[in-house]
Image: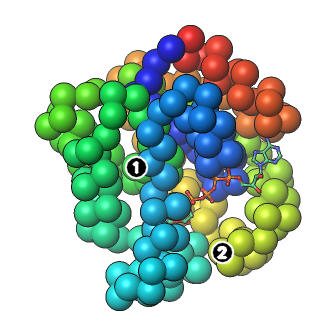
Amino acid sequence: MKKKLLFLGPPGAGKGTQANLFCKKYGLDHLSTGDLLRDEVSSGSVLGLKAEEVMNKGELVSDELVLSIVEGRLENINEGWLLDGFPRNVNQANSLKSLLEKINQPLEAVVLIKCADDYLIKRLLERGRKDDNQQVIKNRLEIYREKTSPLIDLYKKEGILEEIEGNADIDVVFSCIEKSLG
Ligand code: B4P
């Protein structure tokens, strides 16, 4: 089973849901930039307050902040890990490449969880987090298409992309991911 992983996909595709299950079952370190940013917001720090404003609009937090959070974590990571929600643009992907070269742990697979907009919108509205309302979701989807989706081709060219259909029951999606990484 591959153990240096990245989960990619539109908001609500199930990256966080599947990453949690996968890390629990296979004992991987789970690095979710969304969770780390929400922790920063809860801490009430100045950076957290800035991040909250951006997240509530559905935009991407600055690369500088995200990279400073990720860098510290990656330096202390185990041999098995899963990146969830990072990178989210080409600049972050390039920085990740350099960081992984530095620690000599190249990515083994990128799992793209695909899902149609109608399902994404329904799931996110049902979840009802602060950034899960109609206008903000629309913005998040546009930003995904513009800034994050170019990463699909990038990892396809590297020959490490696995495409999974995310519009199915959680356990069905999970076993498709397991099969693709086995
Ligand atoms: P994230 O926390 O990464 O959240 P997400 O992309 O919206 O959700 P995810 O795909 O993980 O969906 P989940 O499994 O939870 O990002 C939030 C914000 O943080 C971003 O908008 C941005 O502002 C900021 N951010 C994060 N990383 C950043 C970075 N690198 N750079 C800059 N900014 C960054 O699933 C959603 C819902 O669907 C859940 O309720 C779940 O139960 C349900 N669900 C999942 N799978 C399902 C299935 N198969 N069937 C039915 N329901 C399902």
Location of residue 160 by image quarter: top left
Tally of numbered tags: 2
**Going by the picture, which residue comes out furthest to the top?**
182
Query: Can residue 21 be seen?
Result: yes
Q: Rate crowding at label 1 as few (under 14), some (14 to 19) or many (20 or more) other CA atoms within 10 Å.
A: many
Q: Give me the residue at 31% from left, 40% from top.
A: 77
Position above or below: 103 against 37: above
Q: Give me the residue at 78% from left, 71% from top.
A: 128
Where is residue 152 drawn, in percent x and y?
48, 37
Horizontal side, residue 167 vs residue 149: left or right: right
Q: Does ligand 1 reach within 8 Å of label 2's beta carbon? A: yes
Position above or below: 127 against 76: below
Where is residue 1 drawn, in percent x and y?
50, 14
Q: Does ligand 1 reach within 8 Å of label 1's beta carbon? A: yes
Q: What residue is shown with label 2?
A: 131
Disc 2 and disc 1: Cα gap in Å? 19 Å
Position above or below: 174 against 19: above
Q: Give me the residue at 85% from left, 64% from top.
A: 126
Mark 1 residue element: loop
Q: Which mark is residue 14?
A: none
Location of residue 68 by image quarter: bottom left
Where is residue 155 drawn, in percent x and y?
41, 30
**Lower position in the chain sequence, tag 2 or tag 1:** 1
Mark 2 residue element: loop
- Assign ligand 1 to one image quadrant: bottom right
Where is residue 11 drawn, in percent x and y?
64, 56
The residue lying toward the viewer, choosing from 30 and 148, is 30
Q: Amino acid at mark 1?
A: Pro
Q: Which mark is residue 87?
A: 1
Horizontal side, residue 73 vs residue 7: left or right: left
The residue lying toward the viewer, choosing from 178 and 73, is 73
Position above or below: 26 against 94: above
